[in-house]
Image (spheres, grey):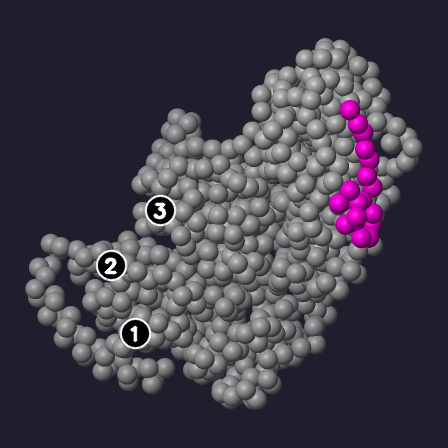
Amino acid sequence: MRTTSVLRRLAPALLVLALAATACTSEPSPAPQPDPPKDGVLRVLAGSELQDMAPVLAEAKKATGVTVQFTWTGSLDGADTVASGQADGKYDAVWFPSNHYLRLDPAAQGKLLSETPVMTTPVAVGVRSVMLNEMGWGDGSQVTWGQLGDAAAAGRLSYGMADPSRSNSGFSALVALASAFSGAGAALTDADVTKAAPQLKRFFEGQKLTSGSSGWLAEAYQRPGQSRVGALVNYESVLLSMNRTLPADDRLTVIRPQDGVISADYPFSLLASAGQPAQDSFQRLAKYLTTAGAQQRISETTLRRPVTPNVAPAAGVPTDRRRELPFPGTRAVADGLLSSYQNDLRRPSRTVYVLDTSGSMKGPRLEALKTAMARLTGQQDPRGVRRFREREEVTLVEFASKVKSERTYAVPETSPATELARIEADVRALQADGGTAVYSSLREAYELVARQQAAAGDDRFTSIVLMTDGESNEGLKEGEFRSWFGALPERQRAVPVFPIQFGDAAKAQLSGIAELTGGKLFDGTSSLDGAFEEIRGYQ
Amino acid sequence: MRRVISVLVAVLLLCGVGYAVIRSIDPPGVTTAQVRVLIGSEKAEFFNDPEVIEEFKAKGFEVKQQTTGSWTMPTANLDGLDLAFPASRGPAEDIKKNKGITAEAVTPFYSPLVVIAHKNAADALANANLATKGTGPVPWKLQMQPYLDKVRTDTKWTSLQGAAATGELAGDIYLTTTDPTTSSSGALHLAAVSYLENGERVVADDAALAKVGPLLKKLTDKQGDQKTSSDGPFKDFLSGVGNPLVLVYESQVASLVAHGVSTGDLVVLYPDTTVSSDHTAVGLTANGRQVADLLKDDPRLRELEAKHGFRPQADPAAFGKALAGHSDPTFATELSAAGIKQAPVASVAMLGKLVDAAKGK
């Protein structure tokens, strides 16, 4: 233990050395190229939640000489990367909250040589502590998924949850909910999913925020305004960690529903394709991470539970047990559940695409845009990660010096193919010419959303995607847009813009728009496909 | 087990001679040969133990380990490895066949499969006559036939007296095992259940296979996604998550206890009919074969094996010695004396069919 305490004092200095994060968010495909293999460097494709392991890994480097070089991606996208063989030779190990989804893929058989669970935490619901009394939920320890669902359906509980088609936290919550609502005694079947559907629909009436990453949800949770939610579905460890910095009014009470949870156990997993030096580094690091000293440090730093019996969980981590719900045993059941969620169970979306077809887009850029958009109309998408969903309302706003056209499509509940083909055909017909009036076009998109909302009188997930390859040089100026936006009614200001930076886009303008509207900037310069697909998690 | 031992004695004599010759050429403590071993995850801590490393070093070897599920070994790339050391004979035989190895494999130690539970779950099983409580040196036992009946009828924990009081005991009663397609413990469990379901006869033909198949599939379907290696469900249990009943190797628990680590309210339930994993080492090179022999014959290594919860074949008293002075949880120092029967394991080919039946393939 003496070594550990010395390391602890050195930790701040080591932090700088230990982590070489190559990308900040996920990119479904293709991943940025990590460096070629190097002695003592382990290239790890990982879930971004593991950023909180930085201090532990800094100490691990000191003790083992192994540097971890992370590339971040979502759990389910990561599983696809491994199963398709794209991780072979590029990474040495993968590290996600769970390998459930990966294991269900027959193509992934034999891709992992060894898996070492490092820490555990259940997926839970963090409810604003100030709301617990009015809900009559006492200290929260006896609450069930059923009670949460009732509150959501009654409009008393709104929450944010990460997209289950991308994120392990969202997926685990969805499985736990389907198990609880169907009363399944064991692993879910298709029949259980069908049985749970009515109650799942009620539960998802309360979902006001969706995202591809848990980090954005945490920020959105604290944003004032109409979109302010009462709860977050996330890992217990993330929710407890948020409480360390949240102001008193925003603090969360972590509810692990009485009827069962699904826990993440963060298996540190060696790829079978890894070379010999990487295998040795992996063993050294895996061994270190399960020592008592490292386990204690992990629990104190991340508020996850240790996996060795001689270490107690950090203060504040509850120790009473919950029923652990099993995970589906086949890909068919898992994908069926995800597809139901996207196309039937969740609140439908209103999605507006503001697309720059100015003169500078001519040629390869316009072709890249057409390809990226066409992917969203394709049929090959078993778990609902890309394609426009059934019941989704999609509007294409084409602009250059001014808005050139606005077309709205309603993807029907059944037989969506015809409408998807119409979207694709219209995208294929786009022509590039003219200047770039970003702010004026964006204003028109907001006005369009207001008209659509008023006409339909509905309550959809509503968001705007803005794709541009240049700087706004016509129409409204930035300042004019800002003051116009500031005067919008609350409901309009709650609509986020997700700008995609492409070509010679003015990054500062775009990040300003994302910040102003509560959206998030995406980088489409290396993969426009990837950016369009990633944003689907937020729509 | 007896049959194995008699074969091993002959092998031991042969190898012992070769070993003595090589040792006399190699001056002790001067050179160490690096030996790469592929092991099931359940032996990782043994090979990581500084005392084990020290003893190997004293005998002239530096052992580098890599872990994987035992049943993934026959298809894994074994290039550059000296020894493959799965947790049972089945994969060891497949490795020999795939690699064209004719030398007899070595089984230095074994460990029976046991079920672990927290005290409240074990009590609930005992109240429902699914388990018998341990007292003093007598271990807890899981009554396999009554348990399998509960699985067949989808009985829920909440129907057992005493379980309703704690929220975590809900849902169907079933054991969590590893994936039998990748991991030895999961496959061996199927062997034991198939033996019981076939009227205490080894499943040897397709008629018997058809008879036991539905129950094996039910046991597997209930679990949903299964982990690939025995380390996973055990670590989950120790972390306070996972199913109330988990099938593990006795050695995983005994190792902690022998090292003086408290396992809290963990109870070890011995299935009244169980299977032992015969940890079987297949030497792929001369160095690998020497290491396998040391694991079996070296007294210091045998002592350390017992300290890691294994039962050395050639030293039946070692296990009890390693656990002397530790009374919680209770272990069966002598399996047959405790009335724990060993189910014979079906042939490798039939075991493959049983696994397929369980997985619905």
The quadrant of the image that shows the N terminus of chain A is top left
Query: Against A200, is A189 above or below?
Result: below
Residue A215 at what x, y percent from top left? 62, 34
x, y percent for residue A338: 69, 52
Query: Disc 3 marks which amino acid?
Result: Ala
Mark 2 — residue?
A: B35
Q: Is residue B229 magenta?
A: no
C-alpha distance separating marks 2 and 3: 17 Å
Residue B308 percent coordinates (x, y):
36, 63
**Magenta-highlighted residues:** A404-422
The residue carrying mark 3 is: A278
Comparing B17 with A496, the one in front is: A496
Disc 2 residue type (three-letter): Val
Residue A458, given in percent of the width and then of the height, sits at 88, 37
- Can the viewer see residue A196? yes
Q: Earlier in the sequence, mark 2 or mark 1?
A: 2
